[in-house]
Image (cartoon, grey):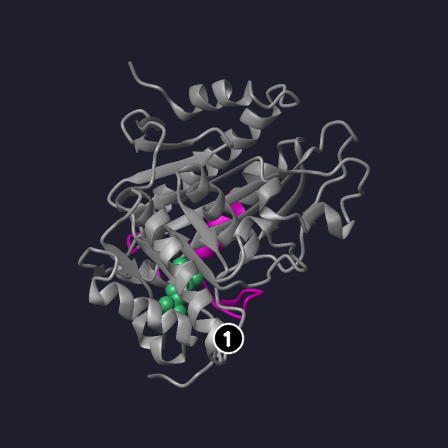
Amino acid sequence: MITTVQQHILREQQALPEAQGTFSWLLSGITLATKMIQARVRRAGLEDVLGAMGETNVQGEEQQKLDVFANQALLDSLSVRDGVAILVSEENEEPVMFDRAKDTGRYVIFFDPLDGSSNIDVNVSVGTIFSIYRRPEGLENDAPGAVLQPGYKQVAAGYVVYGSSAILVYTAGRGVYGFTLDPSIGAYVLSYDNMKMPAQGKYYSVNEANADAFPAAYREYLAQLRRGDLGKEYSSRYVGSLVADFHRTLLKGGVFLYPPTKSHPGGKLRLMYEANPLAFIAEQAGGMATNGRERILDLQPNSIHQRTPFVIGSKVEMEAFARRTEAVEANADVWAPAI
Ligand code: P6P
């Protein structure tokens, strides 16, 4: 007996009293778009979708053709759902707002349509990340408070990793569930029921090329892992595609870090459509996520594309990181030169 994601969402939305089917209708828009995206990702290179569009996006990054397609697929699938009041995409400088009747446009959705897209041409897994909030009552769509909500207010979050298979992972605040796309029936089928991140893993995941520029606390912590101070031998695994690196961390445990550096004190990853959704999932699975000091989900955003340092993973590694940063930063200049 299979459980499709649609059946699962209908069951989940019973816990969202105000949903009245809107919530499942929204999520079906996201799953539809990801099926279209994965079909194109699977054919990358066959339909001349490789290579750049020759344009750059709001992040100043060269747009890959699949980026543009993925963004359009999500915008098209979600804009026809009248439950959507506002869409915020990594690819769009400004939010897309819809003039809905007051009692219909109830949700705000953030998404990174194709994260890790620079890896497309070398056939490395990429992903779509999404994050869903209620539109605050009494606020107009263009009120800053409509989009600048802290992560703990998310009603749902998830991602699809387009790897050896397409896997959708989502939470609506009552556990984390994984679904594998079965191409023979075109449906996401439950494959991971009530996912829990192992309390400790054996991988740490960070771009070591930047290590000399990390704050002392981060360097000290990585040396601690390498020395085996947490009672385990660690291996380094870094795909360079956030969704792939996080998915492994969720399944196997361990820790992923994108630290701040002097040149990028805010880190690289985006709070609203990368860190917040993954932090919601990690916490629901028993893990933790911080910006190096504070819980990601407590951060009050001040802009929709703001970046944040990002440390996310298993309880044991995250608690060790917190102890290390407290110890080192209590006694040293955060930017002390590399040891
Ligand atoms: P770096 C991909 O471009 C991305 O946005 C994330 O998917 C990934 O985690 C990160 O950047 C990799 O960045 O600086 O290590 O190449």
In the rendered structure, does residue 289 fall within the stretch colored magenta?
no
Question: Where does the C terminus fall, quadrant-wise?
Answer: bottom left
Q: Which residues are magenta?
A: 45-73
- Residue at 30% from the left image edge and 72% from the top image edge: 208
Q: Position of residue 62 (x, y in %)?
A: 47, 68
- Residue 213, located in which quarter of the rendered image? bottom left
Q: Which residue is mark 1?
A: 264
Q: Nearer the viewer, residue 4 or 281?
A: 281
Q: Looking at the rendering, which quadrant does residue 100 occupy?
A: top right
The residue nearer to you, when weighing 226 against 17, is: 226
Residue that sits furthest to the bottom in the current view: 337
Q: Residue at x 25, y 60 (%)?
A: 237
Can you give x and y, in whole percent of width and height, for residue 4 in the image?
38, 22
Image-based side of 93 in relation to 38, left or right: right
The residue sitting at 41% across, 53% down in the picture is 312
Vertical relation: 123 (above or below) 103 = below
Say whether residue 103 is visible.
Answer: yes
| Vertical placement of residue 328 versus 132, above or below | below
Residue 49 visible in the current orientation: no
Give the quarter of the figure containing the N terminus: top left
Three-letter residue code for mark 1 = His
**In the orientation shown, which residue stands out farthest toward the top?**
1
The x, y position of residue 235, in whole percent, is 20, 60
Per the image, is 51 magenta?
A: yes
Q: Is residue 267 above or below residue 190?
A: below
The number of numbered discs placed on residues in the rendered structure image is 1
Depth check: give the residue in front, 105 or 195: 195
